[in-house]
Amino acid sequence: MQLNKTIVPIIAPVSMLLMLAGTSVHAECAKATAPNLPDGNTASMEEMVAGQKAVKEFIAEGTAYQGCLDAEEAAAGEDEAPEAKAARLAHYNSVATEQEAVAAEFNAAIKAFKARQ
């Protein structure tokens, strides 16, 4: 079977675009930004409550981001490039690490706040 010479120049760029699209980690997923947390040594009760709300929102947004990455992995299938899988896993794990760090920082702020009471 011989390929039509007018189709080949179209197929190659389209194939390349499809391969690149498959490697774009979190293209549709939005990663949350860590909140600014109050200083428990100086914060008011209102600032601590606002900080708690910000932490809860950040954790929820991070969990949603991880769910989005899971959905992208499922959509990519088994033919996905190993580099793309590794990048997605790194993003997934970085969110968990950042969530833990924010929670630990806020817990330290709570301890400092309570120590002032």
Image (cartoon, helix red, strand yellow):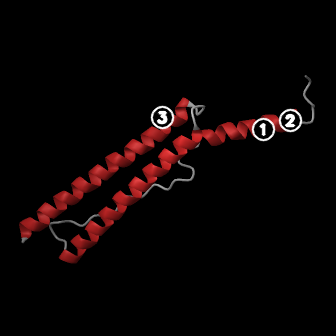
Quarter that holds the C terminus = bottom left
Residue drawn at the location 43% of the way across and 49% of the way down: 66
Q: Is residue 103 left or right of residue 23?
A: left
Q: Please provide percent x and percent y for residue 63.
A: 39, 54
Residue drawn at the location 19% of the way across and 72% of the way down: 43
The answer to whether residue 36 is seen in the rendering is: no
Q: Is residue 113 left or right of residue 19?
A: left
The answer to whether residue 55 is seen in the rendering is: yes
Numbered label attached to residue 13: 1
Tell which of 55 and 42 is nearer to you.
55
Q: CA distance from mark 2 to mark 1?
A: 7 Å
Q: Please provide percent x and percent y for residue 39.
A: 21, 65
Quarter that holds the N terminus = top right
Q: Please provide percent x and percent y for residue 12.
A: 79, 34
Numbered label attached to residue 9: 2
Based on the displayed image, in which of its 4 quarters is residue 53 positioned?
A: bottom left
Whichever of labels 2 and 3 marks the residue nearer the N terminus, that label is: 2
Q: What amino acid is at disc 1? A: Pro
Q: What amino acid is at disc 2? A: Pro
Numbered label attached to residue 92: none
The residue that disc 3 covers is: 86
- Crowd around label 1: few <14 · some 14–19 · many ≥20 (10 Å): few
Q: Tell me the SS state at disc 1.
A: helix
Q: Please provide percent x and percent y for residue 6.
A: 92, 36
Q: Tell me the SS state at disc 3.
A: helix
The answer to whether 117 is drawn above or below residue 14 in the figure is: below
